[in-house]
């Protein structure tokens, strides 16, 4: 991995235990975030696509899956979030010349 890529990617110690909000910015879809939180409050998983931001501030389209996890008593105590870079998928969906 080159130096440029390293400056864009957050290290595990920069994200574990932190809010996903650290990836949000001006173009992040707040309505999708609100729908997701409502699903999580109900104990449901959610998936949405939005613009997030890399460590260097550049934009990236992400397909995000978030799942609440329950502790031994059944109380939801943590979230597992997996953002997937959608740059290539979005480029394939764009009509030629768009």
Image (cartoon, rainbow, N blue to C red):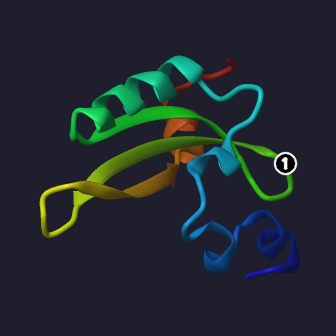
Q: Is residue 46 left or right of residue 16?
A: left
Q: Secondary structure at mark 1?
A: loop
Residue 46 horizontal side relative to residue 32, left or right: left
Residue 95 in view (yes/no): no
Q: Nearer the viewer, residue 48 or 22?
A: 22
Quarter of the image that includes the C terminus: top right
Q: Is residue 77 left or right of residue 2?
A: left
Q: Decide: few, some or many residues near mark 1? Use Cα within 10 Å; few <14, some 14-19, many ≥20.
A: few
Percent x, y of residue 25: 75, 35
Q: Residue at x 37, y 56 (%)?
A: 79
Residue 7 x %, y %? 84, 70
Asked whether 47 or 75 is in front, the reply is 75
The reply, left or right, for residue 72 in relation to residue 92 is left
Q: Which residue is mark 1?
A: 57
Q: Name the residue rendered at 29%, 51% in the picture.
A: 68
Looking at the rendered image, the quarter that the N terminus falls into is bottom right
Picture coordinates of residue 75, whole percent (x, y): 21, 55
Q: Quadrant of residue 10?
A: bottom right
């Amino acid at each position: 991995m080159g130096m440029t890529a390293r400056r864009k990617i957050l290290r595990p110690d920069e994200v574990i235990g932190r809010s996903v909000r650290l990836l949000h910015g001006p173009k992040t879809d707040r309505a999708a975030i609100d729908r997701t939180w409502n699903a999580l409050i109900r104990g449901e998983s959610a998936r949405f696509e939005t613009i997030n931001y890399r460590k260097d501030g550049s934009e990236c389209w992400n397909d995000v899956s978030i799942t609440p996890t329950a502790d031994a008593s059944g109380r939801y105590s943590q979230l597992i979030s997996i953002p997937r870079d959608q740059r290539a998928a979005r480029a394939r969906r764009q009509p030629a010349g768009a």
